[in-house]
Image: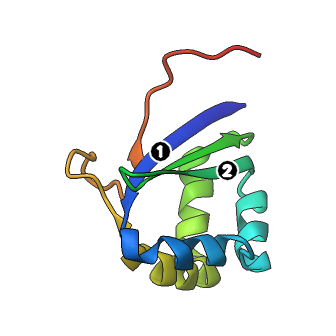
Amino acid sequence: MKRMAHVIGIDPDRIDEYTRLHADVWPAVLDRLSRSHITNYSIYLRRPENLLFSYWEYRGTDFAADDAAIAADPVTRDWWALCGPMQRPLDTRAPGEWWAGLTEVFHSD
């Protein structure tokens, strides 16, 4: 199992809408995540900085293939088209990233 975390900004005027959408994530999006071995997925909001922090656990063996399957899924792409304009990617993110990846520096079970 691999723990993964990411951060992105959010438009402060869209926080309520983003929160409402995530209170009822589309079942097909959740199913695709599950089939791609993503579990224990959470998103947190930090105000007043207006940052979203995501955490999940990957339980598969080929993240690149599973991530590509998520990106190719038409329902997930529709979900991203809805949520993406609310997000504000960090200027410091790596090339090709939308949500900026974070490096784990500590973990305790």
x, y percent for residue 10: 39, 64
Question: What residue sits 71% from the left and 57% below the top?
Answer: 36
Kindly identify the amino acid type of the residue bearing the numbered disc 1.
Answer: His
Using the image, determine if residue 103 lies above or below residue 7: above
**Which quarter of the rendered picture does the C terminus lie within?**
top right
Q: Report helix, strand or loop for mark 1.
A: strand
Single out the residue that lies furthest toward the left.
91
Q: Report helix, strand or loop for mark 2.
A: strand
Mark 1–mark 2 Cα distance, whole angstroms, equals 11 Å
With 2 as the anchor, is 14 left or right in this view? left
Q: Are marks 1 and 2 in contact (CB under 8 Å)?
A: no
Foreground residue, 12 or 64?
12
Mark 1 Cα-neighbour bin, 10 Å: few <14, some 14–19, many ≥20: some
Mark 1 or mark 2, which has the lower sequence index? 1
x, y percent for residue 70: 60, 66
Question: What residue sits 71% from the left and 61% below the top?
Answer: 33
Single out the residue that lies furthest toward the front.
48
Give the image quarter of residue 60: top right
Foreground residue, 94 or 19?
19
**Which quarter of the rendered picture does the N terminus lie within?**
top right
Colouring style: rainbow
Mark 2 Cα-neighbour bin, 10 Å: few <14, some 14–19, many ≥20: few
With 42 as the anchor, is 53 left or right in this view? left
Using the image, determine if residue 105 lies above or below residue 77: above
**Where does label 2 land, which residue?**
42
Question: Can residue 99 be seen in this snapshot?
Answer: no
Give the image quarter of residue 75: bottom right
x, y percent for residue 24: 75, 76
Question: Can residue 9 be seen in this snapshot?
Answer: yes
Using the image, determine if residue 68 lies above or below residue 85: above
- Residue 6: which disc? 1
